[in-house]
Image (cartoon, rainbow, N blue to C red):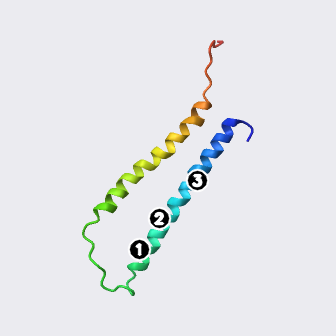
Amino acid sequence: AATPVMQGIIDLHHDIFFFLILILVFVSWMLVRALWHFHYRRNPIPQRIVHGTTIEIIRTISPSIIPMFIAIPSFAPLYSMDEVVVNPVI
């Protein structure tokens, strides 16, 4: 990269993309697992699932925590790009 700020932005992108891939793999695995276990030929009479309190709590809290983990590291490159002008010339 040409500047340290750009290098910080590139590193932030790589870090965020790594976690994005982890989330994609996890969601894809859960989707394939659900399709595998609840296939109509494999399981013609599915189990009745009434409550899933733990999974509902996780599905509610994790989407609010993930943007926070993205926002906190992005403050360093953001504020390093800020230029403070002491004596502005009009």
Q: Residue at x 60, y 36 (%)?
A: 77
Residue 19 percent coordinates (x, y): 54, 55
Q: How many numbered discs sit on the rendered protein? A: 3
Task: Determine whether the residue tagged by mark 3 lies in a helix, strand or loop.
Answer: helix
Judging by the rendered image, the residue that carries numbered circle 1 is: 34
Determine the residue located farthest toward the left in the rendered image: 50
Q: Earlier in the sequence, mark 2 or mark 1?
A: 2
Residue 42 percent coordinates (x, y): 39, 86
Judging by the rendered image, the residue that carries numbered circle 2 is: 27
Three-letter amino acid code at disc 2? Val
Q: Residue at x 25, y 66 (%)?
A: 51
Q: Left of 24 or right of it: where is 37?
A: left
Residue 45 percent coordinates (x, y): 30, 84
Q: Is residue 69 above or below residue 88?
A: below
Q: Residue at x 66, y 12 (%)?
A: 89
Judging by the rendered image, the residue that carries numbered circle 3 is: 17
